Amino acid sequence: MSFSDLVDDINAMLEGAEPPSTGDCCIYKVPSKIRKLNADAYTPTVVSIGPFHHGHPQLQNMEPQKLIHFKAFLQRTEACLNDLVCYVDSILSNFKRCYSETLPFSHDELVKLILIDSGFIIELFLRYHYGGFVFELWFDDGITTNLMLLENQLPFFVIEKIYSLSFSSTNASNPNTMIPCFLELTINFFFSFNKSNLFFDDGDISIRHFTDLIRIFHLQHPFENRPGRIDIKDINIGEWMLHLPSATELLEAGVKFKVNTKSKCLLDLRFSGEVLEIPSLIVEDRTEALFRNMVALEQFHYTNKLYITDYVSVLDYLINTGKDVDILVHKEILENWLGDSDSVANLFNGLCINVVHTNISSQFSILCKDLNAFCRNPWHKLKATLRRDYGKTPWQAAASFAGIVLLVLTFIQSVCSVLQVVQAS
């Protein structure tokens, strides 16, 4: 290669070296240092959506089903395929900016991928909305789990626009037909994640993709009601987290656990007096994937709103062993569908490994500080020990009280006897 050819080659390389558009990016590849802890939690096993996992050999069996659903979607809506192709073609540049990595597909390949995957999702949601389960129960659950994965997403605005374009002519021809908006279909499909029963009017909320919506379900709406945040550099980290006691240690220090039934928000942990209230949580097969993907989204997209990361960090410290899990299960805070308590402990102990935690909500900072202060008070631990050793049952408490009274009376009698001897001498 000549000198001039080498210069031209380097210049060509520099022309393609453009920084990512962080403002539009919302769909990310999970970094290897986090992915290696549990790759299955981030990888689809049934269906690929979007470009990151498209073409994976183990997902090829679902490609014919995606085409069948896309065809049924076109027939259901009587949508003009030409109009849909024109729309996708027009937003392709914006689409690419939503992804954290360069997409190795041609222009035409991306257009087909977007249309088929969007049509599949819309038809899937419509069938579910009107007829319940679409595939076998286990298969449906696998698809639902795959659609919540951060790497397995299409931008929400793309699917929503394809949906609205497809039904605009149908609505015009039959104004009496009530067609739900796509957000309503989406919320209905992911109802099992919507523990707070949140619903939003069309236009009341802006979401980036399905993972983003599921995170919102766990935060509750609106965001402006969430507590402020504190930079970890501005506080003593050892004060709020490094020495946060486990559930066993808190119990031994006199803390009483109680299910928080007043709030529907999973993050609403409260400590008042000697009672720690925690909302109930079902721990099942997909719980790890659920939290891992929400935490991964926060690592990239919500670096100043790490609310889910705060929550799993607190649970990580509350749960060290299977014994801690048993305590929370006994108090009906955790519902263990995994069966093995050690498996639940390992799940929560692994969620925050290699996760960057630069700030914490003021709510959790105060909670941790108050719990540490309570446990450092020796009087609280003494009361808890006396209650545990001598007051487990009413009979044991009565016997202990009677023993104390007898001991006091014996002491008084001894003192009186000594005084009589002294006076006699």
Image (cartoon, grey):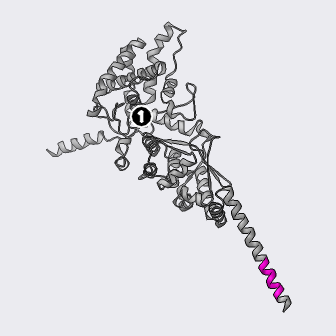
Residue that appears at 79% across and 81% down? 415
Q: Position of residue 372 (x, y in %)?
A: 60, 60
Give the residue type at disc 1: Thr
Q: Is residue 417 magenta?
A: yes
Quick one: quadrant of the C terminus? Answer: bottom right
Q: Is residue 419 magenta?
A: yes
Q: Is residue 83 visible?
A: no
> What secondary structure do most residues of the magenta stretch adopt?
helix
Q: Residue furthest right?
A: 423
Q: Secondary structure at mark 1?
A: helix
Quick one: quadrant of the N terminus? Answer: top left
Q: Position of residue 53 (x, y in %)?
A: 32, 35
Name the side, left or right, on which 305 lies relative to 27: right
User: Residue 220 is drawn in which quadrant?
Assistant: top right
Foreground: 209 or 13? Answer: 209
Name the side, left or right, on which 298 lies relative to 58: right
Q: Position of residue 92 (x, y in %)?
A: 37, 27
- Residue at mark 1: 145
Q: Residue furthest bottom?
A: 425
Q: Residue furthest left?
A: 1
Residue that appears at 48% across and 14% down? 168
Work out whether 274 lies above or below 167: below
Span highlighted in magenta in the image: 413-421
Q: Residues within 10 Å of mark 1 (few under 14, many from 20)?
A: many
User: Residue 112 is drawn in which quadrant?
Assistant: top left
Name the side, left or right, on which 289 lies relative to 378: left
Foreground: 87 or 345? Answer: 345
Q: Is residue 383 visible?
A: yes
Q: Position of residue 278 (x, y in %)?
A: 59, 47
Work out whether 283 lies above or below 321: above
Foreground: 202 or 76? Answer: 76
Work out whether 218 lies above or below 405: above
